[in-house]
Amino acid sequence: MVGSDRPDGIENITGLVLAGGLGRRMGGVAKGLQVFKGRPLLACVLERLQPQVGTLLINANQALPEHGRFGCPVVRDADADFAGPLAGMLAGLRACGSDWLLSVPCDSPFLPLDLGERLAAALVSSGAELAFPSCAGQAEPVFCLMHRRLADSAAEFLARGGRRLQQWQAAQNHVAVAFDQPGDPQAFLNINSLRELQAWQDHA
């Protein structure tokens, strides 16, 4: 990778918060709009992601006016069949004005503050086009830094009926980055239900 193909500055990275799911385990409500520590989950995620990127996007497929109030452009999946996180990533890849896209889920309010830095460093050293964290041997594929040239590959995979994000990632020039000491043991926590949301309200 040379020139602008190197993710060596936040100005060349667009952040994407994935909020395009149906929220089935949250009772069908928009996850990112649920209140956590007095603010919407989405606001917590944006606060931690914003210093790591040059610009921000939100992927959402419902409650569009509400998601638009966070001051970021909102991008929708190309299709209305809720095809999962890869469809949201594709929307971000097609909309971003930078060479690199850093995606995170809307229900991870403790995401690492050095996520983008560590993934970018791994991409520069490896020459890969896509990086995601691995924590205690567990891949965290939705937290993903990828080059926008992967949009065509993602679109083709989805057009063939593919849905599994990790299957698509495995077919790319990728690198898994060890985050065995992420600072916060809950750094990659996903809050999936209203019960979990209530349980984590008192986490420091």
Image: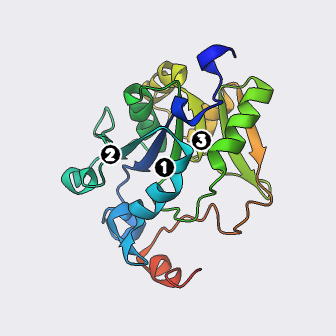
- The crowd level at tag 2 (other Cα within 10 Å; few <14, some 14-19, many 20+) is some
Q: Is residue 157 above or below residue 70?
A: above
Q: Residue at x 54, y 40 (%)?
A: 102
Query: Which label's residue is closer to the chain start, 2 or 3?
Result: 2
- For the residues carrying marks 2 and 3, which lies nearer the camera in this image? 2
Q: Residue at x 42, y 26 (%)?
A: 97
Q: Would you say the residues marked 2 and 3 are in contact, meaning their CB atoms lie under 8 Å apart?
A: no
- Find disc 3 in the rendering and name its residue: 144
Q: Amino acid at mark 3?
A: Cys
- Find disc 1 in the rendering and name its residue: 50
Q: Secondary structure at mark 3?
A: strand
Q: Secondary structure at mark 2?
A: loop
Query: Which label's residue is closer to the chain start, 3 or 1?
Result: 1
Q: Amino acid at mark 1?
A: Gln
- For the residues carrying marks 3 and 1, which lies nearer the camera in this image? 1
Tell which of 129 and 6 is nearer to you. Answer: 6
- Rendered image: mark on residue 72: 2
**Residue 33, located in which quarter of the rendered image?**
bottom left
- The crowd level at tag 1 (other Cα within 10 Å; few <14, some 14-19, many 20+) is some
Q: Amino acid at mark 2?
A: Cys
Quarter the N terminus occupies:
top right
- The crowd level at tag 3 (other Cα within 10 Å; few <14, some 14-19, many 20+) is many
Tell which of 31 and 7 is nearer to you. Answer: 7
Q: Secondary structure at mark 1?
A: helix
Tell which of 78 and 144 is nearer to you. Answer: 144
Left or right of 13 on screen, residue 169 = right
Q: Is residue 24 above or below residue 195?
A: above
Q: CA distance from mark 2 to mark 1?
A: 11 Å
Percent coordinates x, y for residue 68 in the rendering: 25, 50
